[in-house]
Amino acid sequence: MHAYPYTITISSEKGGVGKTTLATNLAIYLKALREDLPVTLFSFDNHFTIDKMFELQKREEEAPDVHAFLMGAKAGEVVQTGQYGVDFIRSSSELGDIHERFKGPMALTRMLAESGIFGIVIIDTRPDLNILTQNALYAADRVLIPVKDLPSLDNCKNIFALFDQRGIDKKSLALIPCLIDSRIKFEGIFKDQKTLLRAIAINRGYRCLDYYISKSPKVESLNTNPEGKIYPILTHARGTEVHSQFMEITRDILRSVDAAKETRACLYHTWLLEKEAHKKEPYLARLEGLAERCLICGALLAEHPDDRSFYFETSDRAARGFLHGNCVNNMLCSALYGLKEHDSTFDAFRTLVADKATRAVSLLLPRIDSEACRLDYRQFSMAGEQLLQKNVDMPGFDAGEFNGVHDRLYLLLNEALAGFEGALRKESWLSVFPIDPGNPEAVLHEESYKTIHRLQKQFAEAILSN
Ligand SMILES: Nc1ncnc2c1ncn2[C@@H]1O[C@H](COP(=O)(O)OP(=O)(O)OP(=O)(O)O)[C@@H](O)[C@H]1O
Ligand SMILES: [Mg+2]
Ligand SMILES: [Zn+2]
């Protein structure tokens, strides 16, 4: 069974509110409380805090990092297990070019869904709302938005607005008061910083966690030491209030992880697979209606699958199928130049015809009246531009006679366009499209088939106009 991660994104447009501190320490607390639960952490900022905190060995220059991951590298190549059992992806100093190349807001959700990473993924973002941050927001089962003061609270509205614009449920979003200085007290009902922030948040319609993180000089000192290291709260600030606050937050998160039936990555991936399957349905239907034989030589295509170089379809779509390259080229050579196969010049003309036919669509429109039987033959470029028109007499066609020149043409027209009592279906015609003999069925795939359909429409209009 495919495994999907539960994704937590830490985001705020405001810098220095404690995002990275929250992301890194949350990873460590999660591992401490649930040792067997894989936790994978990566960051879009370029402070390399994650690398400094979790790296077991020094960074090799070319080691794959989060840039490589976003460019499509496999999780197995970029995720490494680091200190405290936390899996992480190295940070990158340059993600600027990713912004342009990153396709759409759900690209990261898809990457995570297909990555095979499971357990918990924590994404630390930059203080902005660029396309990468947006991707991290949409991928998340939970978004934690640290707010430390009124300006950072004001900034939140942009995140909420993003979700509104796209019609995405905002239930994953929650604010968490951070860097709360418990010494600051107010008079009145909003007795302190966190109560005030929470009240304003709720008043604006934002969900705010019951938990918060205090400002602590001890915590602040964890990244300033002679060793140049960044120490975790769990191991180096156990005596602080922040330690018990992290314990609480971590337990809360584990509760929602346990309660989550389907994560965002799982839902999105299932939806994608279903969409793909829906695309396949018309493809399969198109495959089903194909003629079993090459209508020119009459051979069963299952027995002679090689050289299926053309696809034909009638204007009413009643007959469709593949034709052998050899059969079509021989037919065209005879029809256009009036040559029999054993004529001395046949091969030379055939080469000429074959060369053109692989690049152009042939349209065959029989015009039969009491006076004569003629074929209105046209060639179009794949862009729908008419390249050639030629009238070909078809003596004896009406009477069902073969004359050694047009035999293949008569067979094809009769087989493809025959209607009631052997007469041709009125005003119907057929087109013959060159295809890739290496993968003939590809012509029926959604995109290629749209082209066929569009060309058929253009041909119908061209016929009507003259
Ligand atoms: N609970 C805390 N008590 C005291 N200081 C803290 C606390 N949490 C974080 N800090 C300090 O605040 C500063 C900013 O924290 P951090 O780097 O986590 O913020 P950030 O939101 O990731 O910043 P940026 O937006 O620049 O990425 C750091 O110096 C950090 O040590
Ligand atoms: Mg940061
Ligand atoms: Zn054939």
Image (cartoon, rainbow, N blue to C red):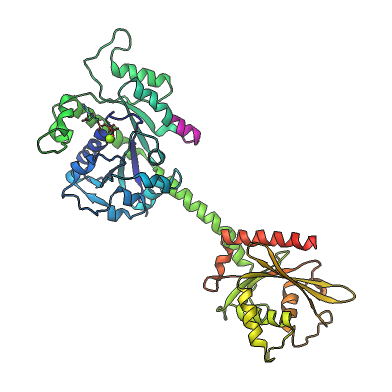
Q: Residue furthest right?
A: 370
* Image quarter of residue 189: top left
* Residue 432 in view, yes or no: no
User: Is the C terminus in the top left, top right, bottom left or bottom right quadrant?
Assistant: bottom right
Q: Answer whether residue 129 is visible to the viewer in this image.
A: yes
Q: Over which residues does the magenta segment extend?
A: 160-168
Q: Quadrant of the N terminus?
A: bottom left
Residue 20, horizontal then vertical, whole percent: 26, 35
Q: Position of residue 247 (x, y in %)?
A: 22, 31
Instruction: State the residue in front, 387 or 258.
Output: 387
Q: Quadrant of ligand 1?
A: top left
Residue drawn 72% across the image and 86% down it: 339
| Dominant secondary structure, magenta | helix
Was residue 166 drawn as part of the magenta stretch in this picture? yes
User: Relative to 85, is 351 above or below?
Assistant: below
On whether residue 440 falls in the magenta region, the answer is: no
Would you say 33 lies left or right of 236 here? Answer: right
In the image, residue 197 lies at what x, y percent? 34, 19
Give the total of numbered labels: 0
Left or right: 112 as drawn, with respect to 305: left
Q: Is residue 129 left or right of residue 279?
A: left
Tell me what residue is drawn at x 29 percent, y 7 percent.
Answer: 187
Q: Position of residue 120 (x, y in %)?
A: 30, 43
The relative height of residue 131 versus residue 150 in the rendered view (above or below) is below
